[in-house]
C-alpha cells in the first residue's frame, strides 16, 4: 500500500491523479497477475556526423561520423537522428560571446539555452564542469519548440547538471548526463519531461548524493530527490540509466482518463534504481514497457516516520481513469542486498491495488521481498502473470504470494491468466471470471529449492536444485542471479 506522499509536485497539480489527498491511502494492498502482447522495443543506432564549427572533436567525445550508441525506443516511435545540422560546444568556462566552436565554446548549457545559442538539429557537446539547472521549454525557448529534427545533448565525462527538465518539446536525445541535487533544490525530479514527444535519455547517472551511508531516516524522507518524472507526452525512453539514493525512483503519469489521452508509449529499459525510500517505479499510463530493470534496496519504514508503504513497481487507476497495455518484463526487484545495513523495510513487489487496468502483462520477473504482495492485481482485466519467481529473502516469516483479488467495491477481476509461476504461496479470488490457473508451483522453502538462497550473505542463485519441487516443472523466471550494477 502506498500513501499519497512523495511526488508532491504531482499531487499539487491534480489530486485525482494521486488518488485523493496527500495523506489518504493510495492503492491498497492486493495481489497481482497480468500479461499482454507488446512488440519488442526497437533499438536505434544514433550516430553524429554533423559538421563542427572548427572541424574537430573534443577529447573523449564521439567524433562526427562515428557510432553514437544504441538508443532503444518504444515500438513505432521515431529513432534518434544519425546526422545533425552542426556540432557546438558548451563549457562552464566558455563565454556567451563565443561562437560555439571547440576553441571558443559557448558558456554553460543552462546559459546557452537562456541566451538562445542552441538551434534545432544541433549536436551539443557538453564539456566537463557544472552546467547548472538545465531547463528547456516552449515558454523559455520558443525557437526550439517547433523542431522537426533531433537535437542531442551529449554530456562528456565530468559534465554535470543540478537538474534537467524538458517541457513541450520534441526530438531530444540526451546521453551521459550526470544530474545531482537535493529534494529541496530540485523541487521536482532530477530528470523531468512534460508534455513532450520523442525524448530519449540514455546512459545517465541521477543521484541525490553518491554516498548515503551516513543518512538518517529524515534524510531518506526529506532530502532524497525523486529520480525520473515523465508526465503526459509520448514516445519517451529512459535506458541504461542509474538512479541512486532517491526518494521515488521513477514515475510515469498520464493525466488522461481514457485512450488516446492515456497513451504515453514509454520505454523504461535496462535501468538501475538503487537505494530508494518510496516506490521504485510508478507506471500510471497506457502503453508502457518496463524491461530489464534492477530495482533494489529500499530504506525506512513506518517506525522510522515514513508513511509510504513501498513497492518495487506500483500501478493504480483512480479518478475514473483506465489504463491498458503495460508490460513488466524481465525485471529483478529485491528489497535489500545487505540485511545488516540500517533502516531496512519490507517491500511489496509488483502491484495494482485500485481502479481498473487492462492488458497488463507481468512476465519473467524476480521479486525478493518481505511484505506479502509479491505480485498482486486487484480488479484487473484481460491480463497475465507468467513465469515469475517470488520469494522472501528475509526472516519475518511472511509468505509472499502471487495473487488475484477483487476491487475494494467487490468488482472481480476477469479474463486473467496466471501460469508457470514459482512463489511461496498463491491467493486467488473465487469470484474471478475467465480465470486460467496453470502450473503454478508453491515453493515454501527457497533454501531447499534453489541452488543458493543465502539470507545472511544475500547470495542468490535461483537455479532449481535437482529433485526440488521446481525441478523439471518449467515454472519461475529465466532470471537466476541479480544483474550487475551499472557504473
Image (spheres, rainbow, N blue to C red):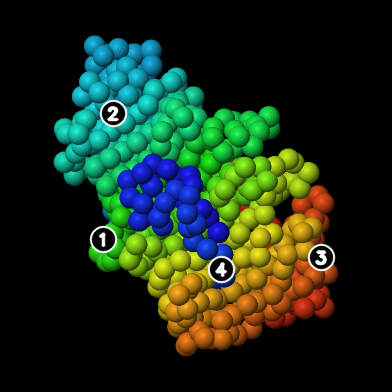
Residue 160 seen anywhere in this rendered image of the structure: yes
Residue at (20, 34) in percent of width and height: 139
Quadrant in which the N terminus is drawn: bottom right
Quadrant in which the C terminus is drawn: top right
Q: Nearer the viewer, mark 4 or mark 3?
A: 4
Mark 4 or mark 3, earlier in chain: 4
In the depicted view, which residue is nearer to us: 480 or 215? 215
Q: In this figure, what is the number of numbered marks?
A: 4
Q: CA distance from mark 3 to mark 1?
A: 47 Å
Residue tagged 3: 447
* Mark identifier at residue 87: 2
Residue at (42, 31) in percent of width and height: 186
Residues marked 3 and 1 touching at CB (< 8 Å) = no
In the depicted view, which residue is nearer to us: 144 or 399? 399
Residue tagged 1: 261
In the depicted view, which residue is nearer to us: 245 or 419? 245
User: Splitting the image into 4 quarters, where does residue 285 fall?
Assistant: bottom left
* Mark identifier at residue 62: none
Mark 4 or mark 1, earlier in chain: 4
Mark 3 or mark 2, earlier in chain: 2
Q: Is residue 53 above or below residue 204?
A: above
Mark 4 or mark 2, earlier in chain: 4
Residue at (28, 33) in percent of width and height: 136
Q: Position of residue 235 (x, y in %)?
A: 32, 53
Q: Pointer 3: residues within 10 angstroms few (<14), some, or many (20+)?
A: some
Q: CA distance from mark 4 to mark 2?
A: 52 Å
Residue 201 seen anywhere in this rendered image of the structure: no
**For numbered disc 4, what is the local secondary structure?**
loop
Residue tagged 4: 30
Amino acid at each position: 500500500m502506498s500513501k499519497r506522499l512523495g511526488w508532491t509536485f504531482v499531487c499539487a497539480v491534480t489530486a485525482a491523479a494521486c488518488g485523493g489527498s496527500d495523506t489518504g491511502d493510495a492503492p491498497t494492498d492486493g495481489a497481482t497477475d497480468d500479461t499482454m502482447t507488446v512488440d519488442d522495443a526497437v533499438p536505434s543506432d544514433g550516430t553524429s556526423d554533423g559538421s563542427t564549427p572548427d572541424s574537430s572533436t573534443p577529447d573523449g567525445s564521439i567524433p562526427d561520423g562515428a557510432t553514437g550508441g544504441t538508443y532503444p525506443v518504444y515500438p513505432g516511435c521515431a529513432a534518434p537522428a544519425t546526422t545533425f545540422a552542426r556540432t557546438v560546444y558548451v563549457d562552464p568556462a566558455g563565454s556567451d560571446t563565443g561562437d560555439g566552436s571547440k576553441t571558443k565554446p559557448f558558456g554553460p548549457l543552462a546559459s546557452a539555452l537562456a541566451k538562445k545559442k542552441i538551434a534545432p538539429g544541433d549536436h551539443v557537446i557538453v564539456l566537463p564542469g557544472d552546467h547548472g539547472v538545465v531547463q528547456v521549454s516552449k515558454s523559455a525557448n520558443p525557437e526550439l519548440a517547433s523542431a522537426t529534427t533531433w537535437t542531442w545533448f551529449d554530456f562528456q565525462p565530468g559534465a554535470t547538471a543540478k537538474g534537467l527538465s524538458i517541457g513541450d518539446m520534441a526530438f531530444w536525445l540526451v546521453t551521459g548526463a550526470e544530474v545531482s541535487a537535493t529534494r529541496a533544490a530540485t523541487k521536482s525530479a532530477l530528470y523531468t519531461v512534460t508534455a513532450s514527444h520523442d525524448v530519449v535519455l540514455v546512459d545517465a547517472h541521477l543521484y541525490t548524493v553518491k554516498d548515503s551511508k551516513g543518512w538518517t531516516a529524515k534524510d531518506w524522507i526529506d532530502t532524497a530527490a525523486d529520480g525520473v518524472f515523465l508526465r503526459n507526452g509520448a514516445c519517451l525512453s529512459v535506458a541504461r540509466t542509474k538512479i541512486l539514493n532517491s526518494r521515488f525512483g521513477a514515475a510515469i503519469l498520464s493525466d488522461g482518463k481514457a485512450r488516446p489521452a492515456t497513451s504515453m508509449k514509454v520505454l523504461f529499459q535496462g535501468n538501475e534504481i538503487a537505494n530508494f525510500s518510496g516506490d521504485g517505479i510508478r507506471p500510471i499510463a497506457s502503453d508502457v514497457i518496463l524491461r530489464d530493470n534492477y530495482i533494489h534496496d529500499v530504506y525506512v519504514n513506518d517506525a522510522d516516520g515514513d508513511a509510504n508503504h513501498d513497492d518495487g513497481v506500483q500501478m493504480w487507476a483512480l479518478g475514473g481513469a483506465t489504463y491498458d497495455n503495460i508490460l513488466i518484463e524481465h525485471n529483478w526487484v529485491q528489497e535489500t542486498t545487505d540485511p545488516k545495513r540500517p533502516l531496512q523495510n519490507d517491500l511489496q513487489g509488483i502491484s495494482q491495488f485500485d481502479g481498473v487496468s487492462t492488458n497488463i502483462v507481468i512476465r519473467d520477473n524476480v521479486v525478493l521481498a518481505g511484505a506479502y504482495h509479491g505480485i498482486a492485481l486487484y480488479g484487473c482485466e484481460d491480463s497475465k502473470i507468467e513465469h515469475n519467481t517470488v520469494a522472501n529473502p528475509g526472516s519475518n516469516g511472511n509468505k509472499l504470494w502471487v495473487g488475484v483479488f477483487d476491487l475494494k467495491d467487490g468488482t472481480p477481476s476477469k479474463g486473467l491468466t496466471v501460469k508457470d509461476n514459482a512463489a511461496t504461496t498463491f491467493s486467488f479470488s473465487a469470484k474471478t471470471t475467465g480465470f486460467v490457473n496453470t502450473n503454478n508451483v508453491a515453493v515454501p522453502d527457497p533454501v531447499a529449492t534453489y541452488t543458493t538462497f543465502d539470507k545472511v550473505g544475500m547470495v542468490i542463485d535461483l537455479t532449481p536444485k535437482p529433485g526440488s519441487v521446481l525441478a523439471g516443472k518449467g515454472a519461475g523466471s529465466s532470471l537466476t542471479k541479480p544483474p550487475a550494477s551499472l557504473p
